[in-house]
């Protein structure tokens, strides 16, 4: 035989317990060891009058059976007094059954304001007042069980009960939210819609039916829902005649009306009515998030790119393009050696590998910070609250996905320090099913540019505003060569990988909280994409750069599919000069998780002293960094003056050793290392030394051109605007 459910030590308040269902609950709780406060105002079914006899009688019945009970005769409108009775008599309150109720039935046209108000006051406001008075006690003791009493009249509507139906369904809404707020406090709140023989039903149902609707058939559900073993919360049940059923929302898959050449219109709604209302393949969203996610997944089923119609009112805001050039507030990030070590552990470093010690032990002679820690430094500048506070953009944080990432290090990251990050919206792209916001973040230590990040953030469902589809400023992924990989490294993540990685800064519950990840449709919390990114980059650093962070120049990657903590990552690498192409798979499933990736390495100075001067040490690099900073600072000002795209090639011994694009034509202007993806208006080739001579004013551009030191192709007239760009930048 199973163990009986008891309530020893628990204090229960049952409102309206002088008769009907309430009496039954009070007796049942009393019989199973609870101390019971039997509340009843003792009026008639319409709420008129008052009398202490009803509550007293039930108290006597409980006591006669050996139970503990006290009476309370206040109206539930005075919720505090009811809870005070429990505290005075028994010192605590554990369980509240909101049951008291009256009826004032009238057809809607005859319903008076008094009929309306009385019903709301007793049912809805009464339950609110009693529950609120109990809430903080439950919160402090980390235990509480609450029942709200709804009714089929509220769930389905019932002739002559407009006031009652409204109050009863209001109680369900109240319960839904209390369940959410109470979850972490072990306060559960459920709603029942009972059906039972009582004075409220006596005149409206035939006697033979009422015979089967005994109130004692309802109390077992109430007792179970209130027991400490019961995990149920936020649920709704219909109960009566010995039967119990659970209810939930069902939603039709619905229909996306807004498509190319099909604007949203009342006619479109009419024409699609059958599809909108078709419940085949219905879903059952149980939370606001699930509701939103499943709606968005419908939108995502539309063809990406051009499936949706250009719509001037995207969910991003009225004119998202206006936010291009927006500068986030400067962000200061301080860290110590401990954070570098924590990050290294987060991306899977271990003392099992002796090579890893330099990233895990601050006393190591070559102690270093992993280069990919640069993403963490920039992350707070963009993500914390920045992204959701951009003037003119309305971004729902639950709709954001990290699409791609680019990181470039100009020097090894310091192992501790205070760095300042400056973030700017470089571009906003319209991908149809969503928008891509491209954000550049430059991070400085004092005046020195340490690293830069480019975040490509995909906002699901925010496309369709008629914006451009690509950006000349975006760092693009690169497909790997078609041959078999040159090297493959497989490494398992641990079950705790996400729990560890999140301590470095990304605390999104998606990576730790099973209920949250379930809402996103994942069976378990998923690993951070940037954690896999950290794994892959250190695989490459070890394979091709002897774990030397000074060799790390840049990394670009696209995030494809999530990884679950505990799965193994397989990094496949192809070396092409100083570029290592890579992609990452989940070993167990074979599915691609990071694609189109590459890591650019600086030349190895230690192994080949005659090697080309590393691009990192070019003097012109500092000048370009300064130009980039100026472009950011001037917003669209320089673009107005110059209106051109400059492609720069820095040469050495006739070979190009670095390329830069200065775009002063599009958006708010931009600088990036590498060639322009389109055709630059003017291309300039110059050696590092001659470039420095130029910016320092030692030679003027005309002289350099005539002497063959400056090669200009394309719109030579634009060359005359070089002064505007180069003026004073050498004073670093
Ligand atoms: P009932 O009339 O036997 O019990 C309600 C009790 O609440 C009465 O004893 C009454 O004196 C008390 N009460 C009324 N106003 C009060 C106030 N302001 N403060 C304190 N006590 C007050 O009715 P029954 O059927 O037991 O109803 C219990 C609950 O179940 C009610 O909320 C009712 O709306 C709900 N319900 C009942 C159904 C049924 O089939 N019996 C169907 C659907 C809902």
Image (cartoon, rainbow, N blue to C red):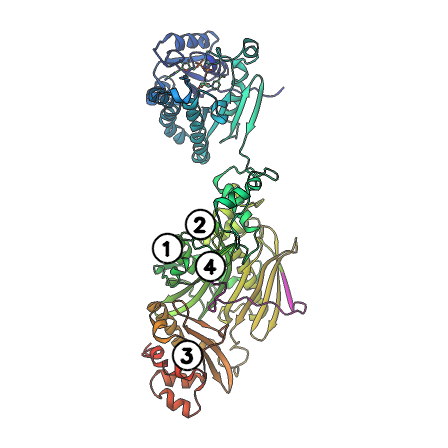
User: Which residue is disc 1 drawn over?
Assistant: 392
SS for dot 1:
loop
Q: Is residue 349 visible?
A: no
| Left or right, 39 with reference to 190 | left
Q: Which residues are magenta?
A: 467-489
Q: Which comes before the other along the chain, label 3 or label 4?
A: 4
The answer to whether mark 3 and mark 1 are in CB contact below 8 A is no
Q: Which comes before the other along the chain, label 2 or label 4?
A: 2
User: Which residue is disc 3 drawn over?
Assistant: 620
SS for dot 3:
helix
Q: Which comes before the other along the chain, label 1 or label 2?
A: 1
Ligand 1: give its quadrant. Answer: top left
| Left or right, 131 with reference to 289 | left
Q: Which comes before the other along the chain, label 3 or label 1?
A: 1
What is the x, y in percent for residue 76? 36, 20
Name the chief secondary structure element in magenta.
loop
User: Which residue is disc 4 drawn over?
Assistant: 466
Q: Marks 3 and 1, how far apart in space?
A: 37 Å
Q: Is residue 689 visible?
A: yes
Q: Marks 3 and 4, how far apart in space?
A: 39 Å
Q: Marks 3 and 2, how far apart in space?
A: 40 Å
What is the x, y in percent for residue 180? 45, 35
Q: Which comes before the other along the chain, label 4 or label 1?
A: 1
SS for dot 2:
helix
User: Which residue is disc 2 drawn over?
Assistant: 397
């Amino acid at each position: 035989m199973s163990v009986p459910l008891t309530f020893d030590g628990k204090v229960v308040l049952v409102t309206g317990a002088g008769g009907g269902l309430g009496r039954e609950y009070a007796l049942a709780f009393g019989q199973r060891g609870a101390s019971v406060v039997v509340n009843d105002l003792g009026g008639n079914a319409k709420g008129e009058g008052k009398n202490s006899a009803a509550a007293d009688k039930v108290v006597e019945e409980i006591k006669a059976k050996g139970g503990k009970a006290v009476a309370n005769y206040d109206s539930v409108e005075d919720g505090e007094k009811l809870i005070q009775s429990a505290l005075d008599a028994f010192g605590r309150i554990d369980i509240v059954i909101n049951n008291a109720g009256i009826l004032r039935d009238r057809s809607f046209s005859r319903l008076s304001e008094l009929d309306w108000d009385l019903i709301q006051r007793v049912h809805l406001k009464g339950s609110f007042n009693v529950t609120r008075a109990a809430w903080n006690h439950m919160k402090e003791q980390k235990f509480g069980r609450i029942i709200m009493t709804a009714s089929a009249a509220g769930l389905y509507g019932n002739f002559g009960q407009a006031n009652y139906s409204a109050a009863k369904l209001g109680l369900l809404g109240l319960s839904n939210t209390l369940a959410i707020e109470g979850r972490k406090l072990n306060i559960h709140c459920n709603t029942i819609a009972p059906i039972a023989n009582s004075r409220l039903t006596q005149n409206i149902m035939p006697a033979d039916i009422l015979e089967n609707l005994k109130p004692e058939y309802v109390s077992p559900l109430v007792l179970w829902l209130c027991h400490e073993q019961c995990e149920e919360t936020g649920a709704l049940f219909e109960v009566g005649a010995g039967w119990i059923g659970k209810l939930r929302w069902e939603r039709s898959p619905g229909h996306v009306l807004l498509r190319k050449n099909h604007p949203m219109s009342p006619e479109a709604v009419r024409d699609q009515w059958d599809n909108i209302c078709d419940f085949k393949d219905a879903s059952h969203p149980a939370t606001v998030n699930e509701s939103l996610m499943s709606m968005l997944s419908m939108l995502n089923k539309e063809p990406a790119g051009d499936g949706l119609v250009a719509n001037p009112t995207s969910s991003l805001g009225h004119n998202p393009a206006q936010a291009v050039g927006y500068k986030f507030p400067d962000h200061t990030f301080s860290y110590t050696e401990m954070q570098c070590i924590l990050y290294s552990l987060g991306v899977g470093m271990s003392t099992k590998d002796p090579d890893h010690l330099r990233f895990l032990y601050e006393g190591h002679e070559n102690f270093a910070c992993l280069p990919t820690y640069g993403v963490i430094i920039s992350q707070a500048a963009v993500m914390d609250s920045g992204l959701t506070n951009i003037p003119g953009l309305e971004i729902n944080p639950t709709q954001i996905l990290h699409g791609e990432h680019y990181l470039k290090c100009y020097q090894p990251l310091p192992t501790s320090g205070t760095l300042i990050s400056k973030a700017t919206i470089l571009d906003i792209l319209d991908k149809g099913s969503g928008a891509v916001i491209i954000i550049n973040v430059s991070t400085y230590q004092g005046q020195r540019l340490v690293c830069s990040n480019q975040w490509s953030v995909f906002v699901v469902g925010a496309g369709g505003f008629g914006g451009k589809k690509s950006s000349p400023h975006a760092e693009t992924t690169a497909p790997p060569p078609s041959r078999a990989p040159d090297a493959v490294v497989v490494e398992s993540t641990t079950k705790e990988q996400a729990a560890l990685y999140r301590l470095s800064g990304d605390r999104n519950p998606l990576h730790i909280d099973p209920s949250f990840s379930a809402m996103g449709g994942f069976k378990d919390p998923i690993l951070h994409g940037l954690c896999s990114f950290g794994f892959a980059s250190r695989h490459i650093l070890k394979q091709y750069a002897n774990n030397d962070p000074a060799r790390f120049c840049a990394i670009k990657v696209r995030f494809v599919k999530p990884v679950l903590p505990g799965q193994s990552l397989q990094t496949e690498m192809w070396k092409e000069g100083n570029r290592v192409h890579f992609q990452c798979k989940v070993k167990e499933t074979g599915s691609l998780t990071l694609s189109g990736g590459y890591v650019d390495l600086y030349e190895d100075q230690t192994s080949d002293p005659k090697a080309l001067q590393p691009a990192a040490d070019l003097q012109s690099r500092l000048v370009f960094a300064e130009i980039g900073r100026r472009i950011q600072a001037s917003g669209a000002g320089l673009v107005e003056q110059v209106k051109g795209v400059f492609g720069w090639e820095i040469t050495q011994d006739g070979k190009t050793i670095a390329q830069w694009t200065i775009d002063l034509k599009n958006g708010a202007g931009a600088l990036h290392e590498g060639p322009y993806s389109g055709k630059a208006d003017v291309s300039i080739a110059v050696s590092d030394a001659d470039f420095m001579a130029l910016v320092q004013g030692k030679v003027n551009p005309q002289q350099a051109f005539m002497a063959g030191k400056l090669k200009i192709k394309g719109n030579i007239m634009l060359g005359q605007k070089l002064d505007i760009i180069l003026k004073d930048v050498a004073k670093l």
